[in-house]
Image (cartoon, coloured by chain):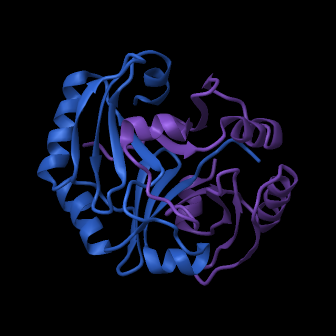
Chain colours: A blue, B purple
Amino acid sequence: MDQRLSLVTLAVRDLDATRAFYVDGLGWSPLLEEPGDVLMFKVADKVILSLWVRGHFEDEVGPIGMTTGIAPITLAHNVATRELVDEVLTTAHRAGADPVQRAEEREWGGYTGYFGDPDGYRWEVACAPGEIGQEVLP
Amino acid sequence: MDQRLSLVTLAVRDLDATRAFYVDGLGWSPLLEEPGDVLMFKVADKVILSLWVRGHFEDEVGPIGMTTGIAPITLAHNVATRELVDEVLTTAHRAGADPVQRAEEREWGGYTGYFGDPDGYRWEVACAPGEIGQEVLP
């Protein structure tokens, strides 16, 4: 099995709210959408983020085991400077992200904060110096 | 905020089991690892998959709300043919994946199956004709 990720799929409760946040709020452009079913964004070369309605996700994958609390996953959006981290968190706040956790210095040398999308999935906005930053920055 | 995903982070219960599965079982090569903390793989151009021990994840991100059941996320690994879907699922089975759900024809025209990694995170192995396949295949 090649070391390769093609899509990340997240189960969402309300696709209209998801669309409003990512498209109207963040200004992203869908690659493909089926109203009431799925909304996809190209998020890297050969990588798609897919937001799929929860019922259809569960029909195919199985029952989701979430209670109150955070999903065991985060998505990171890396940027080149600490100022850009703060700017993106402000953009997310204006788009209605909840919660928005202000960025702070991390012990490993980075500067990162988090915001929640309409389902509470956490995006980490990060300035990561060194190897990781070099690997992922455009 | 640019339309861009840099890292996908999954909280894991036992990093040794995770390493055994992905490195020894699937044959993947770590980009970076900190024993007892994190294991990272490059999984696309400018995209990293990060497996982070659950305690450290929760210290930074917050309490995870999972019960028995599936996490509300899947990762997809797309391949060019139906035969390769079956081959990758067989590889995952040999590596100890549990469960392994045999591939089937999907109503949207694809052929996909799923396997669970040591934490039960589902990978979908997919042959997707048309636009999606063209977007993500190497």
The residue sitting at the bottom extreme is B107
Q: Is residue B33 above or below residue B3?
A: above
The residue sitting at the left extreme is A94
Q: Position of residue A99 (x, y in %)?
A: 22, 50
Count of residue discs: 0
The residue drawn where x is 66% and y is 40% is B14
**Image check: B51 left or right of A35?**
right
Split into 4 quadrants, where in the image is the N terminus of chain B? Answer: top left
Q: Is residue B107 above or below residue B34?
A: below
Front one among B41 and B51? B51
The residue drawn where x is 16% and y is 54% is A95
Q: Position of residue A30 (x, y in %)?
A: 34, 62
**Image check: A89 left or right of A61?**
left
Q: Position of residue B57 (x, y in %)?
A: 46, 38
Front one among A136 and B116? B116
Q: Position of residue B55 (x, y in %)?
A: 50, 38
Q: Is residue A127 above or below residue B104?
A: above
The residue drawn where x is 84% and y is 57% is B93
Front one among B29 and A48? B29
The residue drawn where x is 82% and y is 42% is B25
